[in-house]
Amino acid sequence: MKRHQIGWIGLGNMGTPIVHNLLKAGYEVKLYNRTAEKAEKLLTAGAKVAASPQELARDSEVVFTMVSDDAAVKE
């Protein structure tokens, strides 16, 4: 079965464990986070990092956002 490319924005308390579970389940996940260091653990688990939200959206079939508030969405 083909696993879809998932885009994920937001690696806080909820986002990081969810992405880790997606990777364990065999999904391809591309990440974007304002604080790049938060993605480091997920890179070793197989995630890829996008340079911008635009790149993430272009390369993904579905995009999830899990950020703290409206200001974070706008940023």
Image (tube, grey):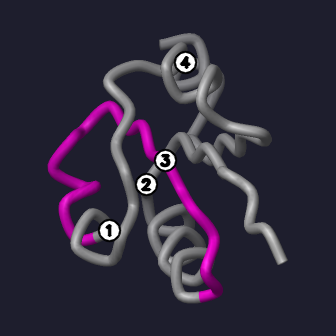
Residue at 42% over, 37% down: 32
Q: Is residue 71 left or right of residue 49?
A: right
Numbered circles on residues, count: 4
Residue at 25% over, 55% down: 38
What stretch of residues is rendered in magenta?
25-41
Disc 2 crowd, CA 10 A, few/some/many (<14, 14-19, 20+): many
Disc 4 crowd, CA 10 A, few/some/many (<14, 14-19, 20+): few
Q: CA distance from mark 1 to mark 4?
A: 25 Å
- Mark 3: which secondary structure? strand
What percent of the width, then of the height, locates residue 24? 54, 87
Find disc 2 in the rendering and name its residue.
Answer: 11
3 or 1: tag closer to the N-terminus: 3
- Mark 4: which secondary structure? helix
Find disc 1 in the rendering and name its residue.
Answer: 42
2 or 3: tag closer to the N-terminus: 2
**Residue farthest to the front?**
1
Kind of residue at disc 4: Ala
Kind of residue at disc 2: Leu
Instruction: Check whether the beta carbons of the residues at disc 3 and disc 1 lie within 8 A of each other.
Output: no
Kind of residue at disc 1: Leu
Disc 3 crowd, CA 10 A, few/some/many (<14, 14-19, 20+): many
> Which numbered mark, 2 or 4, is in the foreground of this view?
2
What percent of the width, then of the height, locates residue 69? 61, 33
Disc 1 crowd, CA 10 A, few/some/many (<14, 14-19, 20+): many
The circle on residue 30 is 3
